[in-house]
Amino acid sequence: MAFKQSGSGIFKGMNSRVTIWATGLIVSFLAVGSLFTAQLAQTLDEARGVLDPFLEWYYVFVFAFLLFYMIWLGIGRYKNVRLGRNDEQPEFTFFSWIAMLFAAGTGVGILFWAVAQPILQFENNPFVSDDLSPEAARVAMSLTYFHWGLNGWAIFAFVALTLAFFAYRRSQPLTIRSGLIPLLGCRTRGWMGDAVDVLATFATVFGIATTLGLGVQQMNAGLSEVFGFEQTVAIQSAVAVVIMGIATVSVVSGLQRGVRALSRLNFWLSIAIALAVLFFGPTQYLFAITLESTGHYVQNLLQLTLYTHASYDSDWQSEWTVFFWGWWLAWSPFVGMFIARISRGRTFREFVMGVLLVPTAITIVWIGLFGGTALYQELFGNGGIIAAVNADEARALFVTMKTLAPDPVGLVISAALIVLIATYLITSANAGTLVINTILSGGYDDPPTLHRILWGIILTLMTVVLLMAGGLEALQSAVIMAALPFSVIILAMAVGLTRALRNENYAARQGDRAEPPREPWPEVDDAGSRGTEVTEDQKHKEKA
């Protein structure tokens, strides 16, 4: 089931209103950015300066609320509510589901920041007085875990659970506006629902473009370290075109086997590289710093979650927490829809525990290995990582690999990392293109080929324009501001989900009330009016 689509013409199979508005908005930004690149960079910087004081506490509030809300859903009265019928079993086995969660979300970002962020926090953070000390190293690692751990995955988990609940339990389209049906009712078929999906598309495009921009910058740095390529915007743009070209061809031709093969390659190549770092690196120190910094992170999680930097006069909160929270928000429609698709049949408890804990644990291990190796070189080795990071964050990973083992082992690991970055970029771009088209088509999971190609081109151009407008700084500013309007939708979705759960049975477990909801769910027809009241049992009988 999907929301109303156009029956003919160029918009056949799409929601024409949402597609026109979203495409026009993004293309207008591209036109302005292409013609007035310097002015765009200046505007983004000035706008961020104005918004930062507000975002430094507002984004903290949003993420703190969602973390506590998701924990409540996972352990509270609705913990055994199932994403599907009461008797429905999970679509995938637990291990398959976990493997796909590993591939979702943040692969490119973790590769980019696994060394750069611990080193930059080691060099300067507001929580230690003695920078470049062993204590600073421990705090730097725990701060990196914080920005990549439970708080960020809570936003992904919330969007995914909301989409899955309304799609699989309430038989609504798998799109963002469905989460607002308890608030908007039949108006989700009108301009209000269209506005929600346009804003979701806008945020998603900037989230994907930011990730692609970071990835191609890091690929260029790797090609420079291994093969001697220059680091220029032209080469980065060419890499973006090649990556998006491969992704677009795969998404158009339906080469899903190839995409699945790339996902499996990501998984096994990541494990192989991690084991190589553990074997050739300072093994004992890596175990020790990972465990110790994890304890520091867990012990200080509540303080960090509510930390707003109100007592300091510096840009740390804006440069780190505000950027990462904006990035997670912008990336959440894409990752949330992916996780929702693979989570049918899970209970709230299984879902929350899996999505919050498993990716966070994997992230801690990955950052512990790579960030710990870089910190060890600075504390006990020959150093040089800080200078490399200050010169170019994108080179940090490959400079660290050079210190890990002598050639040719170091070169082999660096080359493997280049391949890993490329495969993550391709799979992310491929899935991102499909998700954007799914939103624009009103929940239809097989959008027209023409629009898949169109949005592959738009994502490529967006990435190139942001790279030309100032690289990392422009990417950060753009994603922070693009995520702001979508954060309001996120909060509204939380209200909608809570309202929908009032009529929900608590759990299909012994000793708990297990009958379907007594109150019917309002069906919304394509004309935008409230239609016949249909119970869940009736819906499943009709579907059968």
Image (cartoon, rainbow, N blue to C red):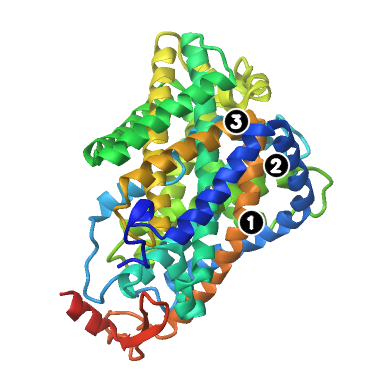
Residue 6 or residue 498, whichever sits in front: 6
Sequence-first disc among 3 and 1? 3
Residue 131 at x, y percent in the picture? 74, 32
**What residue is pinned by disc 2?**
319
> Could you tell whether 3 is left or right of 474 in the image?
left
What amino acid does circle 2 point to? Glu
Residue 65 at x, y percent in the picture? 59, 66
Taking the spot 64% from the left edge, 24% from the top edge, the residue there is: 389
Sequence-first disc among 1 and 2? 2
> Could you tell whether 9 is left or right of 399 in the image?
left
What amino acid does circle 3 point to? Leu
Task: Specify few, some or many for label 2: CA neighbours under 10 Å numbering under 14, 14-19, or 20 or more.
Answer: some
Task: Give residue 462's quadrant in the image.
Answer: top right
What amino acid does circle 1 point to? Leu
**Tag of residue 484:** 1
**What residue is pinned by disc 3?**
467
Taking the spot 28% from the left edge, 79% from the top edge, the residue there is: 509
Between the residue at mark 1 and the residue at mark 2, the CA separation in whole angstroms equals 16 Å
